[in-house]
Image: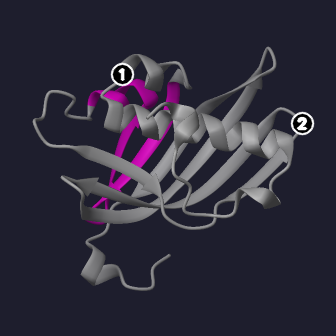
Amino acid sequence: MSATQTIHLYDRSVFSKDEHAVLQVAENFLHGIGARDKTLMTEQVLPSGGAVLMRNGAPIFTNLTGVIDRIPFDSPNKMEERISGQPIVRIDTDIAMLWTPYEFLINDKVDHIGTDIWSFAKLDGKWLVSGVADNALIPDASAGQH
């Protein structure tokens, strides 16, 4: 499946052309996880952009290259992160934000869920991820969190 063949679990018809462009960058990044395509993921980001990953109530601070490096590309397990609910997109000229609930699956089973909060910058007409914050919750313990 290519990045443009993502199965969407939300209504894309409500988004403008520019909002679609922002969403596509996030979808390309997430597709890179399942495709084990580090290059695809790296092409979507400003490498030195910041990231805060909330894990067990504690923040992990890194940059976007560090986020990509955390993914076990050599794992024998099938991995997929997908947007699991209706995203919220906001754009102001050359900056944007995207709020997306997500599910992270390992071998087609939900391993954890959470919310990704993406920041974007538009450079030379192209949207790039400039920052991300997320959390990771155990599904049973987080019912109704989205």
Question: In the figure, is residue 110 to the left or right of 87?
Answer: left
Q: Kindly identify which numbered label has been placed on residue 93.
A: 2
Image height of 125 relative to 83, above or below: above
Q: Kindly identify which numbered label has been placed on residue 38.
A: 1
Image height of 43 relative to 115, above or below: above
The magenta stretch is 48-69
* Residue beneath the point at 44% across and 37% down: 31
**Residue positioned most to the bottom:** 144
Count neighbours of disc 1 (C-alpha within 10 A) and say few if under 14, some if 14 to 19, many if 20 or more: some
The foreground one among 5 and 72 is: 5
Whether 137 is among the magenta residues is no
* Residue beneath the point at 35% across and 36% down: 33
Quadrant of the image occupied by residue 121? top right
Amino acid carrying label 1: it is Lys
Image height of 118 relative to 3, above or below: below
Q: How is the image coloured?
A: one colour
Residue 52 picture location, percent across and down = 43, 46
